[in-house]
Image (tube, rainbow, N blue to C red):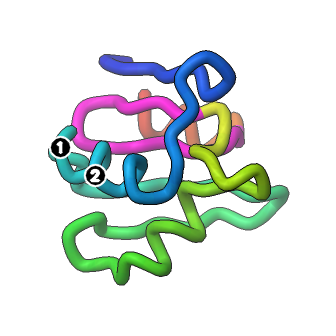
Amino acid sequence: MTDTRDARKEPLAKSAALKWVRDQGVRSVIAVRGKSLTRLKAGEAAPADLTKALIGPSGNLRAPTARAGKVLLVGFSPDAWSEALG
């Protein structure tokens, strides 16, 4: 894992989160919400889809969020994290 972010200590609102994804060179986003898993290609996804994947009910970046290379993991699923960190 190359980057982690503590959403409580370093909250990111919607516009800052989208900019952070672009600045980090993220190519794909794997977002987990409950049992739902969403995979997005960051460069091709609509901003609304990225926002839905990244931003929680507080209006800030969802936790946990981690970047592994060019993959951004949002939310937690043992299977998704194992696949990305493999």
Checking the image for residue 59, the label placed there is none
Q: Residues within 10 Å of mark 2 (few under 14, many from 20)?
A: few
Q: Position of residue 48 (x, y in %)?
A: 47, 80
Residue that sits furthest to the right in the current view: 34
Q: Residue at x 36, y 56 (%)?
A: 18
Q: Choose between 19 and 62: the one closer to the eye.
A: 19
Location of mark 1 (residue): 23
Q: Position of residue 59 (x, y in %)?
A: 67, 54
The alpha-carbon separation of the residues under discs 2 and 1 comes to 6 Å
User: Main SS of the magenta segment?
Assistant: strand
What residue type is disc 2 on? Answer: Lys
Q: Residues within 10 Å of mark 1 (few under 14, many from 20)?
A: few
Q: Is residue 49 magenta?
A: no
Q: Residue at x 74, y 66 (%)?
A: 36
Location of mark 2 (residue): 19
Picture quarter with the C terminus: top left
Q: Are marks 2 and 1 in contact (CB under 8 Å)?
A: yes
Q: Choose between 49 and 13: the one closer to the eye.
A: 13
Task: Indicate whether 21 appears above or below 47.
Answer: above
Magenta segment range? 65-77
Residue 28 lies left or right of residue 49; in this view the side is left
